[in-house]
């Protein structure tokens, strides 16, 4: 099966689009894959039959020619910067398109539309106006978490994983890490993932038990996540990974498109939401400390069981496979 994926990644975008697309592609056997990225990047761990082409997404002609020459059986679009005009031109070439998106203001034309975030009544109306799709898979039950079952570990008490996205928006990591130099955290073990697009260095931290990683292969990151007791995350794909692994999770948002979803997660008491990285202030310090030393964080895990996160992912994949006779 020939699959072509048009994906954004890099500074200001992160790597969430790529990671979730790879999870989707992994469900198909005997595949030949071509990625079209918005900028040149070296991607570690890609299989031999995965190829890369990079170009500015404003260059419609190059993208359309690449699609025509590759002649894919299936196209995946996962990018905030693909214009609706380009989407329509791609659709004319090949209607067998999967669009993955969590931007509720974006228009799409495709065969399959996937958005695994919470959608309230206000946004459902907007989606009905913006999305032209034969089949829509909307809500947390369609999150891509089937791969997590094999890595579930027993949490290590007082272990903390901090991953605030691969771009470290507004240097939020540098602002919160000094909080953990407090003597109250001497019995905690911290593992920090800087992110592949984060060039900051944190050499003078006086955190007692600390290990820092520049970046990690996705499976190694998920293994760390599975073993941690507490997880500090940004508001993107990692939030859903944390929920799927039933983590006590504190979230600092790094992009405006995350806010609607985080509002629902906070309302349903699934996460401790501190605020936005843009509006960082000294009050965040006590909010973060309370998360670790207030027993209410234990209730977050119990509340997760009330929601069917990722329960229909396999159903969605089977629908797509059946349509494509895979």
Image (tube, grey):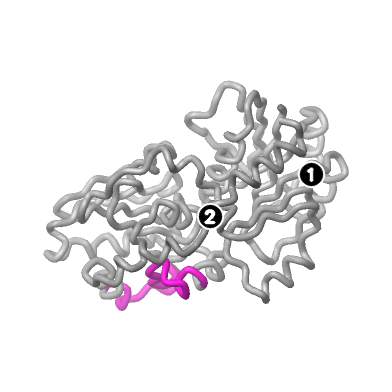
Mark 1 or mark 2, which is nearer the start of the sequence?
2
Which of the numbered marks, if any, corresponds to residue 60? 1
Q: Name the residue located 43 percent from the left edge and 42 percent from the top edge.
A: 149
Q: At which x and y percent is residue 285?
A: 27, 72
Is 135 in the magenta? no
Q: In the picture provided, is 278 more to the left or to the right than 13?
A: left
Classify the position of the C terminus by image quarter.
top right
Q: In the picture provided, is 175 more to the left or to the right than 138?
A: left
State yes or no: discs 2 and 1 in contact (Cβ < 8 Å).
no
Q: Is residue 70 above or below residue 22?
A: above
Magenta range = 264-285
Query: For numbered disc 2, what is the local secondary structure?
Result: loop
Q: At which x and y percent is residue 83?
A: 75, 54
- Residue 204 in view: no
Asked where in the image residue 281 lies, by quadrant, the reply is: bottom left
Query: For numbered disc 1, what is the local secondary structure?
Result: helix
Q: Name the residue located 67 percent from the left edge and 76 percent from the top edge.
A: 122
What is the residue that sits farthest to the right in this orientation?
A: 92
């Amino acid at each position: 099966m020939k699959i072509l994926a048009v994906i954004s990644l890099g500074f200001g975008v992160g790597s969430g689009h790529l990671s979730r697309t790879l999870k989707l592609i992994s469900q198909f056997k005997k595949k030949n894959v071509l990625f079209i990225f918005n900028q040149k990047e070296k991607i570690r761990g890609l299989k031999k039959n995965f190829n890369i082409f990079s170009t500015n997404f404003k260059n419609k002609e190059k993208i359309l020619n690449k699609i025509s020459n590759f002649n894919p059986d299936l196209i995946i679009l996962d990018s905030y910067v693909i214009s609706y005009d380009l989407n329509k031109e791609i659709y004319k070439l090949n209607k067998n398109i999967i669009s993955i998106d969590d931007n509720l203001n974006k228009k799409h034309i495709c065969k399959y539309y996937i958005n695994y975030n919470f959608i309230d009544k206000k946004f459902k109306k907007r989606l009905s106006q913006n999305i032209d799709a034969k089949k829509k898979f909307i809500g947390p039950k369609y999150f891509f978490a089937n791969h997590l079952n094999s890595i579930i570990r027993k949490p290590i008490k007082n272990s903390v994983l901090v991953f605030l996205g691969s771009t470290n928006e507004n240097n939020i990591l540098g602002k919160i890490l000094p909080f953990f130099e407090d003597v109250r955290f001497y019995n905690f073990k911290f593992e920090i993932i800087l992110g592949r697009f984060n060039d900051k260095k944190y050499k003078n931290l006086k955190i007692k038990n600390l290990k820092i990683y520049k970046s990690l292969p996705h499976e190694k990151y998920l293994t760390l996540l599975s073993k941690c007791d507490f997880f500090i995350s940004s508001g993107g794909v990692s939030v859903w990974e944390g929920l799927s692994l039933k983590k006590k999770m504190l979230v600092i948002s790094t992009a405006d498109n995350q806010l609607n979803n985080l509002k629902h997660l906070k309302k349903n008491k699934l996460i401790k939401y501190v605020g936005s990285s843009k509006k960082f202030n000294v009050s965040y310090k006590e909010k973060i400390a309370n998360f670790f030393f207030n027993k209410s964080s234990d209730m977050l895990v119990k509340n997760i069981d009330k929601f069917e996160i990722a329960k229909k992912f396999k159903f969605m994949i089977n629908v797509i496979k059946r349509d494509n006779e895979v």
